[in-house]
Amino acid sequence: MLNFKVEWLESVGSTNDLAFAQGARGAAEGAVFAAVSQTEGRGQRGNYWESEPGDNLTFSLVLRPEFLPVHNQFLLSMAVALGVCDWLKSHGVPATIKWPNDIYVGNSKLGGILIENSISGSSFGFSVVGIGVNVNQSRFSADLPNPASLKLLTSRGYELPAELDTLLNLLAVRYDTLKRGNTTALVASYMESLYRKSDWFRYCDTTGVFEARIKLVKPSGELVLELADGSIREYLFKEVSFVI
């Protein structure tokens, strides 16, 4: 199991940038950089991650998954997202994973994951797992369409260091499953936890809006959708969007 070493920082631009620099300098697997205030947090697709100082979990974790084939790198994202959901479910929150790696409750976004890899040829050098979860924040910018927080969902506050320890331990369990090669169970759990996992919903790509259902997410990360006529479409990140 992972051995974590957590460093809390009062303020930092981006925990991912810091963790990536430390990973390049040889930081051990399990090094964690958590911020009370993150001023330049990043989300998927270059989006800015809004977080009120002292209210939420914003941290990055250094991993060294040399055992994982690079072409199956999305399995790491699956393991991490499941660990976050396990933690939320331990608080009675029915979290789901919106492909590729946003954390949702119903149609509201509770958190996000940004994984950045250092790869040499066909091998991993190291990975930085950035996680942001809304924990105690109660008010959000009007520009955010669908935010939620653990406090808003459960009507109670949380001690961030203790919650980070619990979350990391649950992440370690899922990471260990991946490391032991039990990918079938991992993929099955991920599919079971997917937002919009089986019913028909609307999506949008370059051809317009269409109705489909999720058939599969590949270990390489592609989202596989089935249309009503039985045809199949596969998408990489940014190639399709959910119509909510």
Image (cartoon, helix red, strand yellow):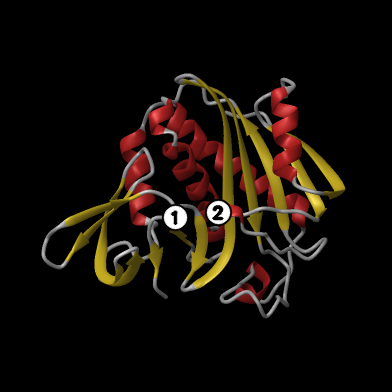
Quadrant in which the C terminus is drawn? bottom left
- The type of residue carrying mark 1 is Lys
C-alpha span from label 1 to label 2: 8 Å
Residue 184 location (% of width, % of height)? 31, 37
Looking at this view, is 157 or 122 the one in front?
Answer: 122
The image quarter containing residue 50 is bottom right
Residue found at x 85% / y 45%: 9
Above or below residue 125? Residue 175 is below
Disc number placed over residue 3 in the picture, else none: none
- 167 lies left or right of 122: right
Q: Are marks 1 and 2 in contact (CB under 8 Å)?
A: yes
Residue 230 location (% of width, % of height)? 12, 60
Residue found at x 61% / y 72%: 148
Above or below residue 227? Residue 121 is above
- First reached walking from the N terminus: tag 1 or tag 2: 2
Residue 133 location (% of width, % of height)? 64, 58
- 218 lies left or right of 51: left
The residue positioned farthest toward the front in the image shown = 207
Q: Residues within 10 Å of mark 2 (few under 14, many from 20)?
A: few
Residue found at x 35% / y 68%: 204
Above or below residue 243? Residue 54 is above
State the residue position of label 1: 238
State the residue position of label 2: 45
Mark 2: secondary structure: helix
Mark 1: secondary structure: loop
Quadrant in which the N terminus is drawn? top right
- The type of residue carrying mark 2 is Arg
The image quarter containing residue 152 is bottom right
The residue positioned farthest toward the bottom in the image shown = 142
- 241 lies left or right of 129: left
